[in-house]
Amino acid sequence: MFCLIGAESAIFVIFVVAYLFYVGKSPSGPTPAILHAPIFFSICLLSSSWTIHRAVLALKRGEVGSFAGFWLATLVLGALFLAGTGLEWRHLIVDEGLTIRTNLFGTTYYSLVGLHAFHVTAGLLALATVSLFAFFGHVKKEHAASVDVVSLYWHFVDVVWVAVFLVVYVVGR
């Protein structure tokens, strides 16, 4: 998992550098000024790091029911974040006319935020798979180390969002 996270981090660095390099270089609008920081959905995603941490701790103690509850809460919080990304994109496309083909800003914005959304989706699929195993009684205390590996990926997704949020909604505006 650490090798995957290292490789994915390098990809995100490339996308962040590209975003920062091209922001403000589009000869025509829209510009980053149309963005509204998704505070609520960001809080949902960042809170999910706490719930997944609690889930892993619960499983290490053998509290499978508590694990399942916290794990499911993580899944719901991540899904809310992804839904928020979808709502933001809908607004940008329909109301603001910003698509990936509109200008350099649109291309780099959707590439960077879309890359993150892809990773959230992959994480949600992993979370849902573990949830199904838990639902059918196949997750036990001895699986805590494996579940912890999945949680590392989810923490990575959260940390990357902090960087993407700062670049797109704070520095890049």
Image (tube, rainbow, N blue to C red):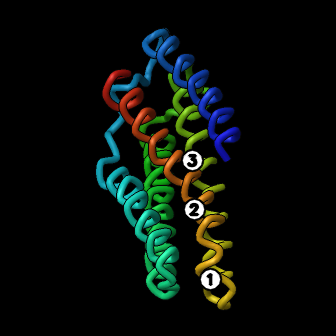
- Mark 3 or 2, closer to the camera: 2
Label 3 crowding class (10 Å Cα cut-off): few <14, some 14-19, many 20+?
many
Question: What kind of residue is marked 2?
Answer: Asp
Q: Are marks 3 and 2 in contact (CB under 8 Å)?
A: no
Q: Earlier in the sequence, mark 2 or mark 1?
A: 1
Where residue 142 sits in the image (x, y, percent)?
A: 64, 77
Where residue 85 sits in the image (x, y, percent)?
A: 47, 50
- Disc assigned to residue 117: 3
Q: Is residue 156 above or below residue 125?
A: above
Res 2 → quadrant = top right
Q: For the residue labelled by badge 1, is the local secondary structure a helix, a strand or a loop?
A: loop
Where residue 92 sits in the image (x, y, percent)?
A: 45, 40
| Residue at the spot of label 1 | 140
**Is residue 29 shown left or right of residue 154?**
left
**In this view of the protein, which residue sits in the foreground, 144 or 13?**
144
Q: Earlier in the sequence, mark 3 or mark 1?
A: 3
Label 1 crowding class (10 Å Cα cut-off): few <14, some 14-19, many 20+?
some
Which residue sits at x=50%, y=64%?
79
**In this view of the protein, which residue sits in the foreground, 138 or 132?**
138
Question: What kind of residue is marked 1?
Answer: Lys
- Mark 3 or 1, closer to the camera: 1
Q: For the residue labelled by badge 2, is the local secondary structure a helix, a strand or a loop?
A: helix
| Residue at the spot of label 2 | 148
Work out which quarter of the rendered image holds the C terminus and state it: top left
Which residue sits at x=50%, y=56%?
82
Structural distance between the alpha carbons of marks 2 and 1: 13 Å
